[in-house]
Every structure is written in structure tokens, then in C-alpha cells.
Amino acid sequence: MSDPKRDVVGIGNAIVDILVEVDDRFLEEQGLAKGTMALIDSGQALGLYRKLDDYIEQSGGSAANTMAGIASLGGSAGFIGRVRDDELGASFTRDIRNVGVEYTTPPATVGPSTGRCIVLVTPDGERTMQTYLGACAALSLEDLDEGMIATSAITYLEGYLWDPPEAKEAFLAAAAMAHGAGRKVALTLSDPFCVERHRKEFQNLADDHVDILFGNEGEILSLFETDDLEAALRNAGRSCELTAVTLGADGAMVVTGNDCRRVPTLPVKKVVDTTGAGDLFAAGFLYGTTHGASPVEAAKIGGICAAMVISQFGARPKEKLSDLI
């Protein structure tokens, strides 16, 4: 097996974020569950969009944010995700390439417009996301770059993308490509509601196709249908080679087989926006893993990245993460 050409390639939703600060009353008026992600159609997206003021538009998407974080750390990253040949699609393409991520997926010329995520941030820094997937939901086998997957040390799969049938097929094919080339496969569970929708399928993914599993406490508890974190971590240790579970202010847990270790979090003066915390933790963890760090050391790097991103507005790092480690 030859040495990989890049550290990680991410496969996920290519989305432009619409970030806006709101209060809890706004969420209640719209009937939104605080701190979660929900899929909406184009009409719902337009209706909510019209109720917003003073928003910020920037490229996002969970796996894309993670790849941007890896590039900011000085690592090499690629991304596979579908946009439309429209204004938002051009913005996404320009932004991800400008941060140093390899992105060559051709834009769709027909079908839905580029996906967007309305990120509603409350004063406590919590984010509630309403996502119109648009073009990215049509990701299929044709969009996969087997050469990029085979020459990346790790292929990172975004759980949010598991909803469309074509994307499921693409995920399984990508995992097979990576393993066929002797590489690793990582999966982020993305959201507790996402896990609830696909629990059995995610369990099968973890057992049969995934080497490195990422999730927060709520997601890992939901995956293994338990309220006992220790039991969930034991199950994770049996399912995957390596598991990293974020616990918010309580840090993270790293599981390798029967070994489970807690990694403390870094103090943060003020939480501005939790958008991207898990994405940037994964960026630091994957960067560390592909650069010889132990799982605990990789989790510490992830914690540094997560602490930085929740201290700013938006999910892409505004300063070089390589200066922080």
C-alpha cells in the first residue's frame, strides 16, 4: 500500500449557512426544538428566511467544516459533495477551495438549487438548524471520486447525508473503496434525531463499515438505546476500533476496545456560538490521528479546535488553528 496523498476526504452535504441571532421566544413562535437540526423543504426555507433580519451568509456543511478545520491545522483534506450551478453553489466552491480543501465535484446543471442551512443562534450560544438539502441530497455513486478516496488516509462520512437512498448507496460504496485501498473509514453521527431515524442502519454501519466513530453524548446514547453512558461506551468499544464522544463542558471520552479515557475540556471565557463545535473537534482529532498522535492526544487537539470555534460566530475557523497547537 502506497502512502496516502492526503490526510482525510470528507463526504457530506455541501451547504451555505445563513446565520442569525434570535431569542428563545422566536424559536417558540416558530415551533422549533432548540438545539436540533430539522430538514425542511424549499417553501419552508423561504418562509423562515423572510422572517430573518441581519443574517450572515457563509459556506458550511458539517463534513465540509471539518475538512476546512483540517486544512487550517496544516493538514491535507479533500471534500466530495454536490452543489447546483447557481450563485450559492459558486460561493460554496470558492470558499472551500480558498481555505485549502481539494474540491472537484462537478456542479449539477439540473434539479434543486444548492442547499442552505438556516442557523438560529440564541444568546446562550446554542444553535437550532433548519436545513434545506437541495442539490446535496442528490449525491450519488457518480459523484464519488474513487481516486481521491483510495489515496486518502481516512474517508470521513457525514451522518446527516444518510437520509436520501442514493447517498446511502454512495456511502457504502465509498467505505468499500477506502477499505479496498487499505484505508480507514470514519463516521460522525451528526444529530440525535438523525440517529433515531436510522438507528439500526447506523448500528450496522458502525459494526461492519466504520473504523472511527464520532458522536456527542446524546447521539451515542441514542445509537445504543440506553441512558447509561458507560454502557453506550462499552458497546461503542465493541463496534468500532476507535470512538470519540464529546460531552460539552465535561470534555470528551475516547474509547479503544475496553479502554475508555476522559479528556478534559479547555476553559472558554464566553460561548458565542456552538455551531461547528463537533465539526472542529473531529477536525482536530482526525488531524492528530493522521499525524501520529495517540487517541488521547488527538482528542486534546480536537478540544483546542472546538474551544476556539465556540468563541466566535460561525463554524469555520477565523484564525489559523495551526497557531494554537
Image (cartoon, helix red, strand yellow):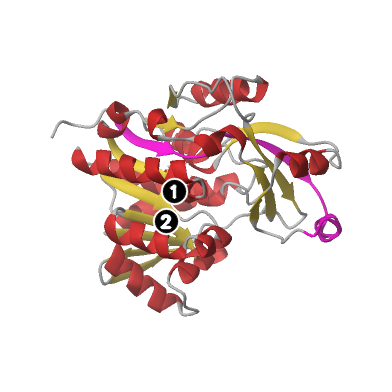
The image shows residue 264 at horizontal and vertical percentages of: 46, 63
Name the residue rendered at 52%, 57% in the picture. Answer: 266
The image shows residue 281 at horizontal and vertical percentages of: 47, 50
The image shows residue 247 at horizontal and vertical percentages of: 51, 65
- Where does label 2 land, which residue? 214
What element does badge 1 sit on?
helix
Residue interval drawn in magenta: 6-31
| Residue 50's disc number | none
Foreground mark, 2 or 1? 2
Is residue 304 visible to the viewer in this orientation of the structure?
no
Label pair 2/1, CB-CB below 8 angstroms:
yes
Whether residue 14 appears in magenta in the rendering, the answer is yes
Furthest residue to the left?
A: 1
Query: Which is nearer the N-term, disc 2 or disc 1?
Result: 2
Give the alpha-carbon distance from disc 2 to disc 1, as whole Å: 7 Å
Say which quadrant the C terminus sits in: top left
Is residue 43 visible to the viewer in this orientation of the structure?
yes
- Where does label 1 land, which residue? 282
Which amino acid type is shown beneath numbered disc 1? Answer: Ala
Residue 231 position by quadrant: bottom left
The image shows residue 110 at horizontal and vertical percentages of: 58, 23
Q: Taking 300 as reference, is 134 left or right?
A: right
Tell me the crowding category of disc 1: few under 14, some 14 to 19, or many 20 or more residues within 10 angstroms, Cα based: many
Tell me the crowding category of disc 2: few under 14, some 14 to 19, or many 20 or more residues within 10 angstroms, Cα based: many
Name the residue rendered at 45%, 36% in the picture. Answer: 67
Say which quadrant the N terminus sits in: top left
Q: Taking 32 as reference, is 139 left or right?
A: left
Whether residue 79 appears in magenta in the rendering, the answer is no
Q: Taking 313 as reference, is 267 left or right?
A: left
What element does badge 2 sit on?
strand
